[in-house]
Amino acid sequence: MDPAGAPPTARYQLLGPVEVRSACGERLVLGTPMQVRLLAVLMSQPGTGWSIDQLVDELWQGRPPKTAAGNVKTYVWALRRALRSPGFPDPAILAGPTGYRLALDGLTVDSVAFDDLAQRGYSALRQGHWSAAQESFEAALALWRGEPFAGLPGWGVLLSVRARLQEQRSSLAEEVADLQLRAGRHHELIEPLRSQIDDDPLRERPWGQLMVALARTGRRADALATYRQLRHLLAEEVGVEPGPDLQHLHTRILRAERELLTSDQRPSESVAPRIAPRQLPAPPTLFTGRAAELARLTTLLLGDSRSASTVVVTGTGGVGKSWLALRWAHDNLHHFPDGQLHVDLGGFGTATQEASPSAVVVRSLLPALGVKPLEIPAEPAAQFALYRSLTADRRLLVLLDNARDAEQVRPLLPGSTRCGVLVTSRHTLPGLVATDGAHPLALDLPSDDEARQLLVRRLGAQRAAAQPAAVDELIRRTARLPLALSIVAARAAARPAFPLQAIADDLAASRGGLAALATDDAATDVRTVLSWSYRLLSTDAARLFRQISLHPAADVSAAAAASLAGAPPHLIRPALDELTRANLLAEQSPNRFRCHDLLRAYGEELTYALDCPADRSAVRRRVLDHYLRVARDAARLVDAGWQPLDPPPLPADASPSAFADHRAALDWFTIEQRALLAAVDDAVAHRSDAHAGHLAQALTPLLSRLSQWHDLAAVQAIAVTVAQRRGDPRAEALAHRDLALAHIQHRRFGAAHHHLRRAMARYDQAGDLPGQASAHLHLAWLSDIEGDAGAALPHARQALALASSTDDRLGEAAALNALGWSHARLDEHARAISYCEQALALYEKVEDRLGAAHTWDSLGFAYHGLGKHPTAADCYRRALALYSDVQDPCGRADTLVRLGDTHQAVGDHDTSVDLWRQALAILDRVGHPQATMLSERLEAYR
């Protein structure tokens, strides 16, 4: 929020010539062209740090002068002076450890405001709010003043951002046209659509919209002539036919279907049911007291009936910040009827556990608000904008636990003052208080009475009353710290025959603790309590406690713990039980444990003090071996054609896996996904590059099957880095190829082409012919998705030649199917069938059910093109059975759509509609972009 009396906000504009304007509209003089280009680079990704070397590359494109680094610093100095002009009191360009960055409220940059408005529009569209969607889309388009970065040379990041923004603008203009057609405004659409087609004649969607607009104005002949014009253009320019949707539209206009030619069936603006997330962990059972703090939270968060606010609960580790926040949240659920969001930001866990704002939004908040994986934007700024849009009209409670700093929290603040936000942190977060209007609530130690209540609740009133002096000493020795009190109480409760005074005496005799919690007063040293609890463990349990502190994630399975220990799971179960009884671990679900971050920190201190570096390295290596072995087994079951690249030998002490089938493998991966991603990060942090690279390879089929494209992109970016560091061209090529896969799913085709070219170059360098074949197959797929089946054919042919030369049966089968599909897309159906039948024979020989499913689908498409509809339907049904067996929902949805098309072609409308509805249910569930198109098709057949 903007505090009263804040200076006017500058506006940074790149949707046109690069400009900076004051709140009153005055344009700032930015200086030389190189200064403008430097500012444009910083504006292209607000908040991102750019090193001197990166800026030199962007400014001079590999041909810098000798004084380039000094020139960059001069340009920054000059821009800072310009940005200190009246109306711009503070320089927006800041220097930090990652380089220079543009520190702005994101919405002051017009491209980010454009993304925000676009996501608001798409959110309204998903809920059926057509007029609100159109208003947001038109407001987004109104921000444009011309080509992005107009007047600046198009290379580097400016080229890629310009292309992305122009693609988004075209898509939004098409969405507006669709909404105008829904509203019956077809007369006024005709000329704007013609202008849009003149600007980009190869985009098919505006041609289809123009055909509909002409047909609805009674100009069917002109609509059909428009189709012929497009068909001629595509044949001349790229040698292809219009896509299947336009062909189907052409048929409907020929039939003069009433649903198409009338616009009096405008959809009602009904609101789709919204998900109300319920993410809060269970309330703390031992919570007592804190009445004043609870009342203060109520005043701060609910004092204004019209809006909630943000409160930052601060205090030392273990003082009970999370307990207080959870207790208040559970007591006030009724004030937040739209749901509650909860995220552990890991700010004070291990370094690899700290959650970035983008990862939190992608993996937790957006999915909780009902956003499917494929609906999540690729860019962090757009992700945050979508999150703000989805929370803008809701009354939610957002609990952000264990935050490190204001920068981690700020992007996660919701887009409405109706939402309440509770933040807990060991730091005071003054930036959040000063800039974002948050209210601080410092949590001190509980009073003596409150500490006594906590002990009495756990020990029982009778035992506590019988030994009041011992209870008082326990309170004094634990410094009233709730975490320490709970550990002492658990120890005493587990030994009811022990006199409380004996426990107090033992506590008094021990020393130690955590450096972060040390004080000048021995009585407030929590290390005493933790070391006392640790000293009473058996040798095996103590060793396992230290080893668990080295696990890459806070959650650890019994199997992973066994690998840490280098022992079979049944032999470490007693130690796990002992740690659980001592409250040093919590068994959250059967065979799955969690260790509090303070306890993990203490365990890490111990292992660095007591265990030699070789032992610690061995522990880390064993758990990475475990995750690599099990992930590889899961990958093989999920994708029969997957093979590891030069797999490292794994020792016998890595805990073995035992999956009954691919379904069990996917269930395991769903539970372990975060631990596996953390393991990749941990491997990189400790220079275990081989483990990081091999884990990234194994995660590709698993993340792909679950449509986790953001995580796939992040993991493969790491894989590229470690492969380059190891000088391994084959591993680098594979990482580039799989990174391209993620970009294709995000519809970032330029980036996909870039990484596939890099993959091809590295495969060529390594002399890896099967790898080259795989890269060609991905390029064929990418060309087909882009609508260019003709361009896909040479890649498929090259893939077949390469695979055949190396006797790669799976590669041959995939290439033959790609050839068959491409020929079918070019209406060469007989040739397509010949290729697909060869592919099917190979797939059945090697028992690859997923490949066989793809090929039966291609055969169905080819037979449909020949008009042999019963044969096509039989092929599609075979594909559906295989897709169900291998649990590939997207493949099943695609085939259901095409089987519906076959039934539609023979006049069986009811069956086709039922099949399309089944497909839509699948596509909606995974958030596939084709869901909208299929929904509109079903709407036409109501």
Image (cartoon, rainbow, N blue to C red):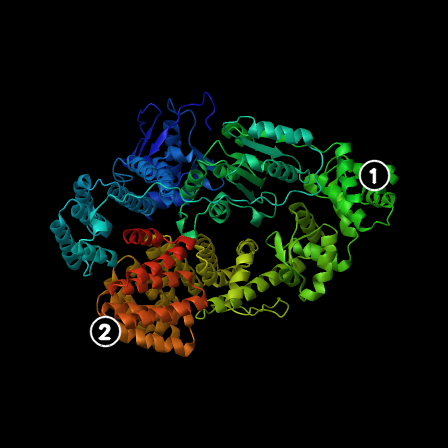
Q: Position of residue 148 (x, y in %)?
A: 29, 40
**For the residues bearing labels 2 and 1, Cβ distance under 8 angstroms:** no
Residue receiving disc 1: 471
Residue 75 figure quarter:
top left
Furthest-top residue in view?
5
Given residues 224 and 703, the one toward you in this image is 224
Disc 2 crowd, CA 10 A, few/some/many (<14, 14-19, 20+): some
Q: Where is residue 787 in the image (x, y as percent from the top left)?
A: 26, 58
Given residues 390 and 474, the one toward you in this image is 390
Q: What residue type is labelled 1?
A: Val
Side of 383 relative to 325 (left or right): left
Q: Position of residue 543 (x, y in %)?
A: 72, 57
Residue 381 figure quarter:
top left
Residue receiving disc 2: 830
Given residues 823 and 761, the one toward you in this image is 823
Q: Where 750 falls versus 93 (above or below)?
A: below
Side of 462 relative to 66 (left or right): right
Q: Where is residue 674 in the image (x, y as percent from the top left)?
A: 54, 54
Q: Helix or strand or loop: what does disc 2 sit on?
A: helix
Q: Helix or strand or loop: what does disc 1 sit on?
A: helix
